[in-house]
Amino acid sequence: MTDRPPNVLLLLTDQERYDCTAPEGPPVETPAMDRLAADGMRFTRACTPISICTSARASLLTGRFPHDHGMVNNCHEADAIRANLDPALPTFAEALGEAGYDCTYTGKWHVGRDQTPADFGFAYLGGSDTHHDDIDEAFRTYRAEEVGVPVDGVEFEEAIYTHGDEGTFVAAKAPFGVEATRAYFLAERTIEAIRAHAEARGADGRGGAGDGEGRSGRGVASGRDPTAWDELVTLGDADAIAGEGSPFFHRADFYGPHHPYVVPEPYASMYDPAEIEPPASFAETYEGKPRVQENFIAYRGVADFDWETWSEVLAKYWGFVTLIDDQIARILETLEETGFAEETVVVHAADHGDFVGGHRQFNKGPLTYDDTYRIPLQVRWPGVVEPGSTCEAPVHLHDLAPTFCEIGGVEIPEGFDARSLVPLLEGRRPPAWPDSTFAQYYGEEFGLYTQRMVRTAAWKFVYNGPDVNELYDLDADSGELNNLIDHPEYADVRRELEARLVGWMRETDDPYRKWVPKTFDVDGS
């Protein structure tokens, strides 16, 4: 251990459900993520502030709720409210960089249409895809020249599409090896970054990451020379790695398990669809629910999906989660081999969840169920976090922004509307820590649809601007099937949550605070 601030490694997944790594969840194999929880702390009540990629990622970067940073829907869509994040907003990466951290980034960005991580304090090392960002060619080059499997022209097996095989690509088996997947490639880039940081530190960064086999022989060794770093980076380069004495912050953003859930063997057949039981929420009838929820099944093109189809989709999704977990295992092994494990804080989280058949829905949308709003969060911090600890305090994804600042000994930038998790990680919950999480939704490619949500350990209240509101008893109805909003026995609970939501809207200067309270008959002045 040294006197310098610890390194930080953020492993962010895309649309990973909370239950995949929960002890009480389905039988998904995630030993690497489980190891982070066993060696650190697992949060049981982590929530995304919004279940949209651009918006959630902008919140993580800026420590603000979406109504504050302004990126309220996906930036790549034609109807984006903002195409780019305001560069004047302070970010945790810029704060860390100014304090001497070497900040590097691989993988998905999706925060600004014409921006890259390099515009917000990171050295970007490549790995984007053409749908969300298209800011480099690294993966295409890797696939064509090093693996011999071009990205285009691949014929997938067992393919499933929406809208009667004419819509969105949902899931399939890939006819190539693990080394051709983007998850493997992004792990390689992260491993290279860690080794480059080790070389800059003066450590022996030339050692390989084991034999590359991973557990159960599922990984594939790359055989790549780690000294060829300067030939492999795209928008960043080895010169971005500062010298000995500087801690690093590296962010690895995986493109998954976001759809399409395309995985090669052995992951494609790892989970038997016939053995997967439907979740409680699959019994959804939408009685007493906002009309848009049932409409969304047709809109997404999955109205004809029965459980047999959904179980096949879910099996591929679980396989995708395990594929990413194997890549995380390779990254953690590299931390050990470079001597960084004991001086690096490792965080695993997701931008938001995914329905994958929950409530018979696909992807995400104007439905604030736990399927998409509850997220995994595990933090390993040697010497600080008690191994195997569990935190039941409610937290938000963008609480990580001030957390990273405090870990790095950096003053939290003005304007952050988030709380550092460091006290919780140290095993103490401040008396003033809230007992609720809050979230919102504006719409994605189909237009605006205003929602606000407050969640406690036992209750969830959802404000739906153009339709009926929602109230769920989470203890009695974990599947969130029964909307109690008009039930007279729960009127007091409803009023208390309405007041709590309005209070939060007022405290965070939510632009809807002026008129939403009038629908509750609550004083919102």
Image: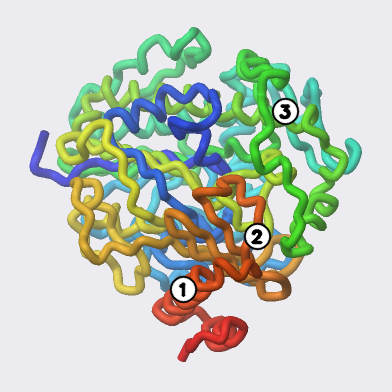
The correct choice, above or below, for 121 with respect to 347 in the image is below
Is residue 235 or residue 402 the one in the foreground?
402
Q: In the rendered view of the protein, which quadrant contains the N terminus?
A: top left
Q: Residue at x 26, y 59 (%)?
A: 98
Nearest the viewer among 180 and 417 is 417
- Residue 210 x, y percent position in the rendering: 36, 13
Q: Splitting the image into 4 quarters, where does residue 55 fall? A: bottom right
Identify the residue position indicated by label 2 in the image: 483
According to the picture, the residue beneath numbered tag 3 turns out to be 311
Q: Position of residue 398 (x, y in %)?
A: 41, 58
Check if mark 1's residue and mark 2's residue have beta carbons within 8 Å: no
Q: Residue furthest front?
A: 489
- 406 on left or right of 443: left
Q: Is residue 27 visible?
A: yes
Instruction: From the viewer's side, name the closer residue of 152 and 317.
Output: 317
Which residue lies under the disc numbered 1?
Answer: 496
Sequence-earlier tag: 1 or 2: 2
Q: Name the residue furthest bottom.
A: 525
Marks 3/1: CA–CA distance: 39 Å
Q: Are marks 3 and 1 in contact (CB under 8 Å)?
A: no
Label 1: few (<14), some or many (≥20) within 10 Å? few
Whether residue 501 sits left or right of residue 336 in the image: it is right
Decide: is 58 above or below 450.
Answer: above
The amino acid sitting under disc 1 is Glu
